[in-house]
Amino acid sequence: MKKRVLSLLLCGLMTAALLAGCGSKEAPASDAPTETDAETEAPAEDNEDAGTPEAEDAGESDMAYVQGKGTLVVGITDFEPMDYKDENGEWIGFDADMAKAFGESLGVDVEFIEIDWDNKVLELDSKTIDCVWNGMTLTSEVTSAMECSKAYCNNAQIVIVPADKADQYQDTDSLADLNFAVEAGSAGEAEVTALGLSCTPVKAQSDALLEVKSGTSDAAVIDSLMAAAMVGEGTGYADLTYTVQLNSEEYGVGFRKGSDLAAALNDFFVASYGDGSMAACAETYNVQAALIEQ
């Protein structure tokens, strides 16, 4: 640009000198822009973003984006009783059913995608998914990276051990020598790390249970709601049990930072809690005691 301006300036000086030397000869007037003028009328930087996805999305709300494509893509992991597959391979669970109802209220279909929990923010920001709805603990890290709904369920991180060893692990001091299996990027991993305990990150909380069952890890830390559904007598993990509660926490749903879908979901929660449909859904999956009034 600097070279172009300098070139135009030199041309102008040369023309002025030439006209002065010609005296009575006047240069013919012309209204037609020269090729150089046309090039300088619209600076290149004004059009750099034209046609890019960023330019197309500018000013478009997240709700308009989702409704425009007709699908709300929900990022989840296999986490009973919140999100898991039935015998037909369909995603069900308290979170899954509530997500379907929310999608219906928006007039869109709902698609579930299993994600690597440790990459949930990247998946969200890249628009691979539109929200994270999977018993997600509202930690400061989560709320700073996402636009989150209000809390809708209480939860806790609890220790899982073999049932025949449970009496040995009844407080945090007794856990010092154990190696824990934890879901990577989870609240469980954060609690174990904060206590300075040894841990092995795995892809999902269900994998953490498998680690303990197989003896690969001494113990696991998972969500209390998952433990109530999957651990103990009458479950697939009858030989495991839970002992120490490490914290108390709340679940929320995460959207892209600044998304207007979070406020829409809050309104949906208020309406579904008020008409009893949220409680009815919770009772289906035995999580009604964990519900937070909306």
Image: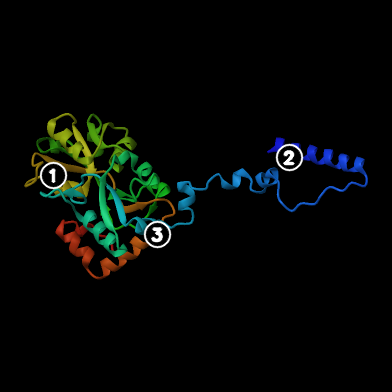
Local crowd at mark 2 within 10 Å, few (<14), some, or many (≥20)?
Answer: few
Residue denoted by label 2: 5
The residues bearing labels 2 and 3 have C-alpha atoms spaced at a distance of 44 Å
Q: Residue 30 carries which label?
A: none
Are circles 2 and 1 on residues that touch, CB within 8 Å? no
Per the model, the C-alpha gap separating discs 2 and 1 is 75 Å
Left or right of 50 in this view: 114: left
Up/down of 139 relative to 166, above or below: below
Picture disc at residue 231: 1
Q: Mark 3 points at which residue?
A: 64
Q: Is mark 2 on a helix, strand or loop?
A: helix
Q: Residue furthest right?
A: 23
Q: How crowded is mark 3: few (under 14 residues within 10 Å), some or many (20 or more)?
A: few
What amino acid does circle 2 point to? Answer: Val
Amino acid at circle 3: Ala
In the image, what residue occupies the spot 17% across and 46% down? Answer: 227
Among the 4 quarters of the image, the one containing residue 120:
top left
